[in-house]
Amino acid sequence: MAAPGGDDDIGIFSTDRQGAAAGYNPGGFGDDFADPDYVFSRSIVGTSFSAPQISGVVALILSVNPKLAWRDVQHILILSARHFDLADPDLKTNGAGFRVSHNVGFGVPDAGQAVALARTWVNRPAAITVTFTANNVKPIPDDALRVLITGPNVPAGLMSIHASPGSGLHPDAATANLPLVDVGSATSAITSNLTGKAALIQRGGNDFDQKLQFAADAGAAFAVVYDNVNGTERILMDIDFAPIPGVFITQNDGEALRGYLQTNGPAQAQLQVSPVIYSFNVTNTLVCEHVGARVQTDHSRRGDLRITLLSPQGTRSVLQQVNFDDSAGPTDWTYYSTHHFGESSAGAWTLFISDEERLNTGNVQGVQLIIDGVAITDTDHDGLDDDWERAHFGAPLAFGPQDDPDGDGYDNAREQLMGTDPNVAEAPFKLDLSPWNEKLARLSWSGVTNRTYEVVAGTNVVSPLTVITTLAGRFPEREWFTPYTNLIGQFFRVRTAAP
Ligand SMILES: [Ca+2]
Ligand SMILES: [Ca+2]
Ligand SMILES: [Ca+2]
Ligand SMILES: [Ca+2]
């Protein structure tokens, strides 16, 4: 889950210790905040201010329904959450239709929606745990992230170039083999069209995530960044919010590659990693809650390792990125993910462990897959209880977890967890108009994705109102902002546009 923690420009409004020496706020904030005791601050920032907000929502949830267990509370938080940064490149929809990212989890819970769910919540059935073990020792290929170059007369030293990963998007599955274009150092927007191509970029002049943003804006599918100093050094790039994957190669390799492109013309590049792979074919049918991967290695540096888990539904949990941790291991560690929440457990789960830094090596000694969830009868392996499907839709098990036959925006996976009727749109349409700030009013309503809405407005409710904007729907809520100008006597109505 996520909650606001402020940023560099806007701090969090918080209580503060009194007095200039003890508190964060040693002075007032103008007339409105001229409290002599300085018992508040709006200048501080951090996750310390996010966690109490989630705790507060949990307290509200429990205040209306003290019988909830921790799993019920977690369900309610997930079901009431929404995303605000739809440009988050890591945002994916899992097999049950929940949007989840490694940056903000399931999003920010809506306290009102959470409390409403809690009032009528039926405790989830007991969960069970199923565990699968593989004890076959496998050596982990060292320094296994590569840029593969193909083209006329490629020198042997450039056919397979060792690379370091960045944070953020990663070529866990090999990229396409695409023409590689030298775009210099990408310190400003790239004017050439890179659609269907990859960018070769020199370090320097601006941040890595901005270079990758420029490459992506020009259409590039991925980027190879090379150092501008230090010959054989490689670094880990901080590219958490870059929209395309990027890898980093040395100055020597990069300049040789650039020289080859200049003298030989077009060449192609592909990003590829060689991990150790463990696969588990699961026949148990659970609705997943937590999925764990226990990893035992004798590796001499755990920061070299990237560990990901791919579910049968195609959702990948990144359990560990390559990082700066110089300790040995992991000798015995269990990583847990919630990204498979609501997915069916049945099918092939795949654990990938790759070493993406030179020096330091090791073996996987053993791994375990641990799935926690509610056991159901699920012959079609869709995460929906077959009895629930038949009771609502008849015999053929025709609908899937992400279908929404009643069109209320809640897909079948959500309706099963919430205990609502998947054939009845029971959520009432709610329209709200409220002040947003001194300049804008906010109009919001229960939104359904794949539906279009018209906002109509006018100053006389009995004369025809005119359509002032048409907006794409967004689940669970669509919002629209309008200036306060001429708002006296203004009426708004929102309706579904004809398809
Ligand atoms: Ca290594
Ligand atoms: Ca089923
Ligand atoms: Ca529905
Ligand atoms: Ca429904």
Image: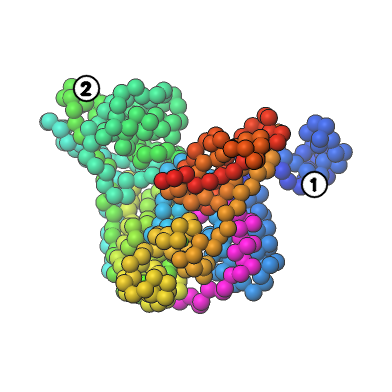
Q: Mark 2 points at which residue?
A: 262
Q: As shown in the figure, which amino acid type bears the numbered disc 2?
A: Gln
Secondary structure of the residue carrying numbered label 2? helix
Magenta span has 129? yes
Q: Name, please, the residue furthest toward the left.
A: 153
Magenta span has 362? no
> Which numbered disc covers residue 498?
none
The range drawn in magenta is 102-130
Please tell me whether residue 124 is drawn above or below residue 174 in the rendered image: below
Quarter of the image that includes the N terminus: bottom right
Q: Name the residue under label 1.
A: 17
Q: As shown in the figure, which amino acid type bears the numbered disc 1?
A: Arg
- Label 1 and label 2: CA atoms lie apart by 63 Å
Which residue is pictured at 62% across the width and 41% down the height?
492
Mark 2 Cα-neighbour bin, 10 Å: few <14, some 14–19, many ≥20:
few
Q: Where is residue 358 in the image (x, y as percent from the top left)?
A: 32, 45
